[in-house]
Amino acid sequence: MKKLGILFVCLFVCFGTFAGDGEDESKTFLFLFKQKELKALKLSLKDLESQFATFKTKSYSGNSELALIIETPAAHFDECFIGQFLIRTDKNINIKLEEIAFRMIDLTESKQLKSRLLVAYEESVQNKKKSDKNAQQ
């Protein structure tokens, strides 16, 4: 009975730690649009944002290109997959998001790449400092 209790506690702890892995692994994507193209399709940025109501979205417009930021809850999404989503126009025509957006950027991947590049740069600076100290001695 004691062994069964210990086994149960161990399994509970193991499954609890594995269940915690992968939480909050959301990904953020940036889609840029040209205002002339959206006007030609009779679409607004708010129309695009409303079609992604299941995700957290933010839209930005101003003097430059129109931007739509989409945050997906699962890490297995990529910009190509989201680019395949169909957007419905006023004339009930379905167009892929990748055909409307002129730039699609995975902000999560870009952030990770920036972190790796900074670490590599800092390591190279440290190695250079060490080699300079060794050369001076």
Image (tube, grey):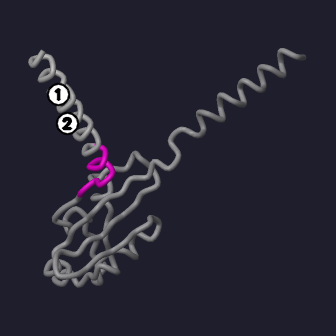
Q: Residue at 88% of width from left, 16% of height from top? A: 2
The image quadrant of residue 83 is bottom left
Q: Nearer the viewer, residue 119 or 47?
A: 119
Please say if 21 is above or below 60.
Answer: above
Residue 109 rendering spot, x and y as whole percentages: 30, 47
Q: Residue at 26% of width from left, 71% of height from top? A: 67
Q: Which residue is mark 2?
A: 121
Give the Cα separation between the discs numbered 1 and 2.
12 Å
Around disc 2, counting alpha carbons within 10 Å, would you say few (fewer than 14), some (14 to 19), or many (20 or more)?
A: few
Around disc 1, counting alpha carbons within 10 Å, would you say few (fewer than 14), some (14 to 19), or many (20 or more)?
A: few
Q: Is residue 30 left or right of residue 130?
A: right
- Give the amino acid at mark 1: Lys
Q: Nearer the viewer, residue 122 or 80?
A: 122
User: Would residue 111 be counted in the magenta stretch?
Assistant: yes
Q: Is residue 27 left or right of residue 118?
A: right
The image quadrant of residue 57 is bottom left
The image quadrant of residue 126 is top left
Instruction: State the quadrant of the N terminus.
Output: top right
Q: Residue at 36% of width from left, 63% of height from top? A: 70
Please say if 92 is above or below 122.
Answer: below
Residue 129, which numbered label?
A: 1
Mark in the foreground, 1 or 2: 1
Residue 82 rendering spot, x and y as whole percentages: 32, 57
Residue 60 rendering spot, x and y as whole percentages: 29, 76
Instruction: State the quadrant of the C terminus.
Output: top left
Q: How many marks?
A: 2
Label 1 sits on a secondary structure element that is helix
Residue 136 rendering spot, x and y as whole percentages: 10, 19
Q: Residue at 18% of width from left, 74% of height from top? A: 65
Q: Which residues are magenta?
A: 105-112
- Give the amino acid at mark 2: Tyr
